[in-house]
Image (cartoon, rainbow, N blue to C red):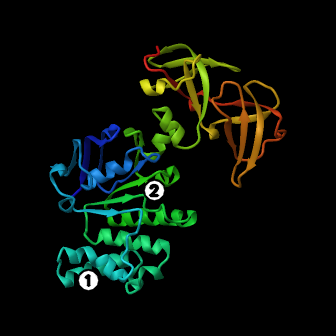
Amino acid sequence: MVHQLAIESLTKIFQTAEGPVTAVDNVSFGIGGDDFFTMLGPSGCGKTTTLRMIAGLESITSGRVVFDGRDFTRFSAFQRGIGMVFQSYALFPHMTVFENAAYGLRVRKLGEDETRARVQRTLDKLGLGGLAQRHPSDLSGGQQQRVSIARALVYEPTMLLLDEPLANLDAKLRVQMREEIRRIQKDLGIMTLYVTHDQEEAMSVSDRIGVFDRGRLRQFGAPAEVYADPRSLFVADFIGKANFIKVDIESSDARGARVSGSGLAAFAVDRVARLDADESAEIPSGSDGLILIRPEHLDIGAGESDGLPCRVLRIQVLGSFVRYIVACDGATRDVTVDCRRLVPGLAEGGAAHLTFSADDVILFAREGRS
C-alpha cells in the first residue's frame, strides 16, 4: 500500500502572558509513498511545532492531519503508529543497546519472541547487530544515534519523524550520518519527515523540502526546484547564496518585465515573482524591485568593460572553486561570484566588471506592481 499524508491548513496558536502567538500559520502540503520530506528553516519558524502536531505530541488549534484518508487529529500519539527520533538520543545508560531498542515493545507488552525477532532484525539493518550487548557509553555518537533510530523503527511504523537528529554530532559525522539515514529510509521504503535548520543537509537528503518562515510554509518542492526558482526573497536568501541588485521596472506584462539599474543597461527578464505585502516592504525605497543572481551565474573580468562595474574586495581560493567578493553600485550587500578557477588580471582592490545571462535572473517585484 502506498501511504499518503495530507496536512490541511494546520495552525497552532500559543496563549502567552503577552498575548496569543501564532507558531504555525495555515500550513498545507502533501507527501506520499517513501518520500523523504524535510521541513527547513531558522529557529522559531514553526517546523518542529508542525512535526509535533503531526506526531500527536502537540495539540492543534485548527486544521487537520490526514493519513491514508483517516483524520489523525482524532487519534492519540500512540494510535498513530509513528516512529519518532529526537535531537537528544535519550538512551537509558544502564541498558544495553538491545534493551534500549526493545524498551518500547516491552512497554506495549509484545510477546518476548516477537520482541527479540524485531529488535535483532532492526539492529542488523542498522549495522548494530554486533553491538547489541554494549551500553551507550561504549558507543560513538553516530552509533548512539543509530540506536535511537532503531528504537523508533522496531514499532514498524508507517511514518518516521526526525527532529534535528544530527545536531549533537560533529560536522564530519553529520555528513556521514545524513547519508546513512537516507540509505536506511530508502531501504525500508518508509515515509520520513525530517526537521533541520541546515540547508545543505536538507538539500542533500530530501525528495521534497518545505521552507518555513515565521510560522508559514513559504515554498514546497524538490530541492533543485526550490533553489532554481524561489518564489520569495526569504527562500532565495535562505537556500544557497544570493546576490540582490536593485532595479527599476521600465515595463511589465504577463510575459515578463524590462528592467534597468545603476550601471546596468536595460534588459528583459522572463521570470518574475510577485511579493506579498510583508516582503514588498523589504524592497529598498527608490527601487521597483530586486533581481536575484546566484554566484555561479555571474562571470567576472578585470578592468572596466561592458557589464556591471565593481571593485574586488576579497579573493578566496576554496579548493574546487574560487570565490570573489566584490562591491558594486545597486547591490543590497557585497556580491559573491563563484568561478571554477582564478581569473587573470584580478587583484584585491582592483576594478572589475560582472556579466550574466538574463535567463539566469529572477525579478522580485512589489505586490501589485504592474
Query: Quick one: quadrant of the N terminus?
Result: bottom left
Which residue is rendered at x = 36% and y = 79% of the image?
124
Query: Secondary structure under badge 2?
Result: helix
Q: Quadrant of residue 338?
A: top right
Query: Secondary structure under badge 1?
Result: helix
Residue lying at the far bottom of the rendered structure:
133
Say few, some or many: other residues with alpha carbon within 10 Å of mark 1 (under 14 / 14 to 19 / 20 or more).
some
- Pointer 2 residue: 205
* Residue 206 in sight here: yes
Total numbered badges shown on the rendered structure: 2
* Label annotation for residue 116: 1
Q: Are marks 2 and 1 in contact (CB under 8 Å)?
A: no
Task: Mark 2 or mark 1: name the one nearer the start of the chain.
Answer: 1
Q: Which of marks 2 and 1 is in front?
A: 1
Say few, some or many: other residues with alpha carbon within 10 Å of mark 2 (under 14 / 14 to 19 / 20 or more).
many
Which residue is rendered at x = 43% and y = 70% of the image?
145
Pick the residue in front: 193 or 91. Answer: 91
Pick the residue in front: 76 or 3. Answer: 76
Eyeballing the image, is 79 above or below 31? below
Eyeballing the image, is 127 above or below 47? below
Residue 299 percent location from the top left of the image: 70, 36
Residue 142 percent location from the top left of the image: 48, 71
Left/right of residue 191 with respect to residue 165 in the rendered view = left
Pick the residue in front: 188 or 144. Answer: 144
Residue 205 percent location from the top left of the image: 45, 56
Q: Which amino acid does label 1 sit on?
A: Arg
Pick the residue in front: 103 or 156. Answer: 103
Q: What residue type is labelled 2?
A: Val
Residue 42 percent location from the top left of the image: 47, 46
Which residue is rendered at x = 21% and y = 75% of the image?
107
Which residue is rendered at x = 82% and y = 41% of the image?
344
